[in-house]
Image (spheres, rainbow, N blue to C red):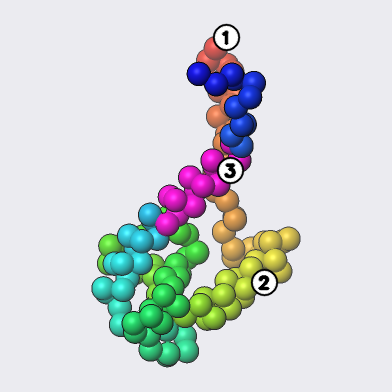
Amino acid sequence: MPDRKNRPKIDTDDKIVTMARRQRAERESGYRGQALKLFPKICGRCGREFSGEQLRELTVHHKDHNHDNNPADGSNWELLCLYCHDNEHARYLENNSHTSGAQSKDQSPLSTHTPFADLAALFKKDK
């Protein structure tokens, strides 16, 4: 049995990144396959058609930008080519960078989760 000191160290960051990439690929393969069955193989923005080898250039875009929102009917998806998909995300990021500083009155808050909302009540319970 090899000496513990001489074993190569396993970088936990590498493990986490590898696991996250694998989970992402599994998640994408599921909804991508569904989207390709539901929709014509045409970019929803530029109208370019895809088939054969070129099909890998067609991506699934989440309309609400939430990659965990994958309804079976495909209502949150649209097929976009790589170029239109990159453009859509760049526009989304640019738009958010302009509005993230101050919210207007008609906008809902960016986050609704308040992790410490009941903290005082929990402390009172323990006493």
In the shown orientation, is residue 18 left or right of residue 39? Answer: right
Say whether marks 3 and 2 touch (CB < 8 Å): no
- Closer to the camera, 76 or 51? 51
Q: Is residue 115 magenta?
A: no
Residue 123 at x, y = what percent? 59, 18
Residue sticking out furthest to the right: 101
* Image mark for residue 11: none
Q: Is residue 11 above or below residue 53?
A: above
Disc number lying in front (1 or 2): 2
* Distance between the alpha carbons at the discs numbered 3 and 2: 31 Å
Q: Is residue 14 magenta?
A: yes
In the shown orientation, is residue 80 left or right of residue 72? Answer: right
* Distance between the alpha carbons at the discs numbered 1 and 2: 49 Å
* Residue ID for mark 3: 14
Determine whether the residue tagged by mark 1 lies in a helix, strand or loop: loop
Residue name at image x 73 percent, y 60 percent: 101
* Residue ID for mark 1: 127
**Mark 1: few/some/many CA within 10 Å (<14, 14-19, 20+):** few
- Closer to the camera, 80 or 65? 80
Is residue 41 visible from the viewing direction of this image? no
* Distance between the alpha carbons at the discs numbered 3 and 1: 44 Å
For badge 1, the amino acid type reads Lys
Disc number lying in front (3 or 1): 3
Q: Is residue 71 above or below residue 12?
A: below
Residue name at image x 58 percent, y 78 percent: 87
